[in-house]
Structure formats: C-alpha cells, structure tokens
Image: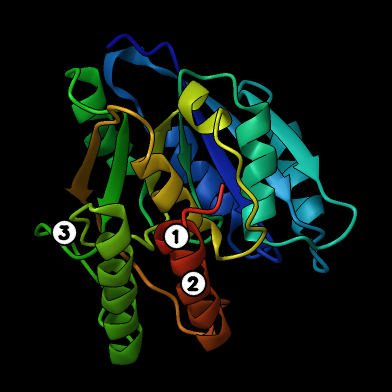
C-alpha cells in the first residue's frame, strides 16, 4: 500500500496548556516512507486560551501543513472528529488527542500493517505489548475492558481496547460511514460500523499510555460509560445506521 499523506485529526477542548507540546511531538515525527503529514485541528469552542495557542503555533511554524477549524458552540469530541474526518485529504487518517496521553512517535507502529498491505484499519491498544503505561484508576481499566468485551460480542471482533484514542482509518472508507455520536459515544459507534464494512481488515498494535488524572485535565466520566453501553447496544445489537 502506497501512502503519500497521513491526516492527523486533533480535537481540542480547553487544552491551552498542552496543545503546543503535542504539536511539537507531531511535528518531530518522521513517518515511514517519507509520508507527509496533514494536521487538522478542530477547536470545539474552548473557553480558555486554546485558540490563541493554536494560532500562535501555526504562525510560528509556517512550514507545517495545518488546517484549523473551530465550532461556534461546544458540540463534543465526537463532533470535532467528524469535522476532521470530513476535511481530511490524506489516504489514511489517525485521531490524536490534544493532551499528552498518547505518543505520536508510535504512528509508524500503526502504519506498518497498512504499508505491508495487511490492514485497512488499525487500533492502538493500551492493553497489549510491552509499552509504558501509567498506573491509574483501577475501575476505569475494568470499565474499559467491560465495554470492549460488550462491543466485541456484537461486532464479532476480538479487540483488547475499543475505547482507545489511536485509531487509523482508510480515509475514503471512514468518510463513507454515517457517524452520529457527538461525544464519547464516537468510539463504540465507529467500531460497530467499521466492523460491518464488507471485507474490512482490522488490526491492533500495542501503544504506550501516559494517562492523566482529573486534576491534570482528564474529562471522561461515568456518564460517558453509560452512554457507551447505550451506543454499543444501539449500533451493535440493533445495528442502527
């Protein structure tokens, strides 16, 4: 598989403290086979200085290919990802959170199964491999594994980490799917719907995870877990389109 460009979608909400740091990391990554990078930053109506931080970074790095979009009201992480997917022009795209929980140096690990011609979609699992993982939140881990197992029951996949941020997609494939969930329900919805694409080849690779505490800005909570169960049943069991 020949890839000329990778689109990197970065949804951002109140990430003024870390957005420049993750952009530095993305900038420094040298992709395999000299694949070029297209950054698509979507500001989901942040109430802090996220916009100023992004605009300043773009002006200071004119050599980077960056598209910047902002929502006029807060619509949710899923909606920001939808906007990024619609604007992507690379053959493949990957989702990158604006915090520092995931390491862009591992893009190449996700790209390898695609470049070798094996995969159309690659999930980066926090629960497999020997990569570093910050030790945090026992019940979050149990919740993630429960949601992944429930999702697998209806998608007939054997994923270890459905809720992972790092998902690499064939751009045309993901653009052809009707995605509805505007918040954290994006993960179970996209997993259910991508699993039903005829002849889709889904792979999983281990990735590092440098998790944040709530004091450090983590946003997902128990209500998002309840919504995830609803979405698994809606898009998995009942196969809503």
Q: Tell me where residue 35 sits by quadrant.
A: top left
Tell me residue 75's x, y (percent): 77, 60
Q: Is residue 218 visible?
A: no
> Which residue is labeled 3 in the image?
131
Tell me residue 48's x, y (percent): 80, 68
Tell me residue 179's x, y (percent): 60, 46
Secondary structure at badge 1 equals helix
**Rendered residue at 35%/26% (across/down):** 30
Q: Give the vertical position of 128 relative to 193 (above or below).
A: below
Q: CA distance from mark 3 to mark 1?
A: 24 Å
Among the two numbered marks 3 and 1 on one chain, the one whose residue lies closer to the N terminus = 3
Residue neighbourhood size for the residue with mark 3, other residues' Cα within 10 Å, grouped as few (<14), some (14–19), many (≥20) = few
Secondary structure at badge 3 equals loop
> Which residue is labeled 2 in the image?
228
Residue neighbourhood size for the residue with mark 1, other residues' Cα within 10 Å, grouped as few (<14), some (14–19), many (≥20) = many
**Rendered residue at 24%/19% (across/down):** 115
Residue neighbourhood size for the residue with mark 2, other residues' Cα within 10 Å, grouped as few (<14), some (14–19), many (≥20) = many
Q: Are marks 1 and 2 in contact (CB under 8 Å)?
A: yes
Q: Give the vertical position of 189 relative to 84 (above or below).
A: below
**Rendered residue at 56%/65% (across/down):** 184
Q: Nearer the viewer, mark 2 or mark 3?
A: 2
């Amino acid at each position: 598989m020949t890839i000329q460009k990778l689109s990197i979608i970065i949804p951002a909400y109140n990430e003024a403290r870390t957005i420049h740091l993750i952009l530095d990391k993305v900038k420094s990554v040298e992709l395999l086979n000299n694949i070029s990078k297209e950054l698509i930053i979507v500001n989901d109506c942040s109430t802090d200085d996220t916009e100023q931080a992004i605009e300043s970074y773009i002006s200071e790095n004119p050599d980077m290919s960056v598209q910047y979009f902002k929502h006029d009201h807060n619509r949710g992480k899923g909606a920001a990802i939808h906007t990024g997917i619609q604007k992507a022009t690379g053959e493949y795209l990957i989702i990158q959170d604006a915090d520092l929980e995931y390491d862009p140096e591992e893009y190449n690990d996700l790209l390898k199964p695609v470049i070798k011609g094996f995969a159309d979609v690659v999930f980066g699992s926090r629960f497999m491999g020997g990569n570093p993982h910050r030790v945090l939140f026992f019940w979050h881990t149990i919740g993630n594994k429960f949601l992944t197992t429930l999702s697998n029951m209806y998608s007939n996949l054997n994923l270890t980490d459905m809720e992972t941020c790092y998902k690499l997609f064939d751009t045309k494939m993901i653009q052809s799917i009707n995605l509805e969930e505007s918040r954290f329900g994006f993960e179970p919805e996209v997993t259910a719907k991508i699993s039903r694409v005829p002849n889709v080849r889904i792979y999983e690779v281990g990735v590092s995870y440098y998790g944040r505490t709530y004091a450090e800005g983590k946003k997902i909570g128990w209500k998002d877990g309840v919504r995830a169960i609803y979405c698994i049943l809606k898009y998995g069991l009942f196969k809503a389109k």
